[in-house]
Image (cartoon, rainbow, N blue to C red):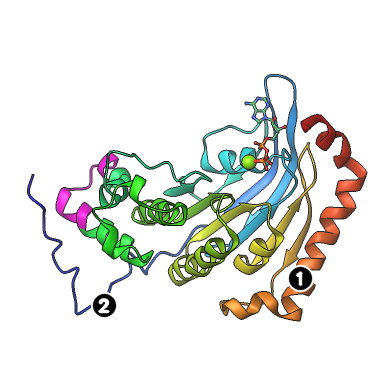
Amino acid sequence: MGEADAPGSETGGHVAPLDTTQAGVTVAIDGVSRRFRSGFLALTEVDLTIAAGELVAVVGPSGCGKSTLLKIIAGLLTPTGGVVDFGGSRPETGYVFQDAHLLPWRTAIRNVELFLEVDGVRKAERRDRARRALRLVGLADFETSYPAELSGGMKMRVSLARTFATDPELMLFDEPFAALDEITRNRLNNDLIRLQRDRGVTGVFVTHSIGEAVFLADRVAVMSPAPGRIVGVVDVPFGDDRRAELRTSPEFAAVARDVSEIMAAHEVAEGHEIMAAQQ
Ligand SMILES: Nc1ncnc2c1ncn2[C@@H]1O[C@H](COP(=O)(O)OP(=O)(O)OP(=O)(O)O)[C@@H](O)[C@H]1O
Ligand SMILES: [Mg+2]
């Protein structure tokens, strides 16, 4: 098959954003609980409203129900109590997992095209959008590389590009950078801030890392050990100005301390049996 040239994608090195008009969507999580068939109560009475264009990080100990909550927001799991309301129909949603989940027999650009193919987007447009998404994540020169030829950080960039190429109104991130070294993780955080904030997409970002949560988010929601519920929400007062130096500032440390104090207060009270059970 011949390569379809992307019409209008090359304008003297300037790369047009995929879609700058995304307004994002509001997500109202209202009294959400989830009991599994085993009888295990994973979430109880979770209340959280995420404004259009806002990025909320969710932190909490392993097993507290963070992935369960994301799956419920995505509509992959139904809550056994409560509702998630988007103020209308279910938004176009992008989901980024810890593992990049790339198809090893496809080149980077063909991996980015995958969801567009599933959505029935025509080849020329697919190629154009995939190419621009790869540029946005800094991988313009790696279109024809296979996953085996890419580092862990690069694979995750392809995974981000694949999701952003679909122009979602809502982005759900389930610890996407947890397996990466700190330097790569920080770099990807810097890029994600640009991708997410420039485009005004609403996002929920699950992480174990308090530093990552504070660096990325407008607010950090802290969950208790299972059954998970929101035990505190910390405002992050840094606006869109998230340069790398922020991480070493006293203001940053103060917000991170607020988050860890909430976590610590609930860990001691309820968490030790869970931790013991997971050993
Ligand atoms: N299908 C299922 N059936 C029964 N229990 C489940 C199921 N899925 C998850 N659980 C349990 O629900 C709890 C929450 O799981 P979940 O994966 O949401 O936790 P998490 O906060 O994402 O943990 P981690 O940080 O380790 O990823 C865990 O105790 C888990 O064992
Ligand atoms: Mg999880």
Locate residue 232 relative to residue 11 in the image: left or right. right
Locate residue 77 relative to residue 119 in the image: left or right. right
Q: Position of residue 57 (x, y in %)?
A: 64, 58
Residue at 37% in and 52% down? 150
**Is 207 drawn above or below residue 234 in the view shown?**
above
Residue at 82% in and 35% down? 274
Residue 93 visible here: yes
Q: Residues within 10 Å of mark 1 (few under 14, many from 20)?
A: some
Residue most extreme to the top: 38
Residue placed most toward the observer, 123 or 207: 207
Secondary structure at numbered mark 1: helix
Q: Position of residue 97 (x, y in %)?
A: 51, 45
* Disc 1: which residue: 255
Q: Residue 44, located in which quarter of the rendered image?
A: top right
Quadrant in the picture for the C terminus: top right
Q: Check if residue 269 falls in the magenta segment.
A: no
The quarter of the rendering in which ligand 1 is drawn is: top right
Residue at 84% in and 33% down? 276
Q: Amino acid at mark 1?
A: Val
Residue at 23% in and 42% down? 120
Q: Amino acid at mark 2?
A: His
Q: Earlier in the sequence, mark 1 or mark 2?
A: 2
Q: Position of residue 80 (x, y in %)?
A: 67, 30
Circle on res. 29: none
Residue placed most toward the observer, 112 or 34: 112
Quadrant in the picture for the N terminus: top left
* Disc 2: which residue: 14
Residue 91 visible here: no
**Segment tinted magenta in the rendering:** 117-127
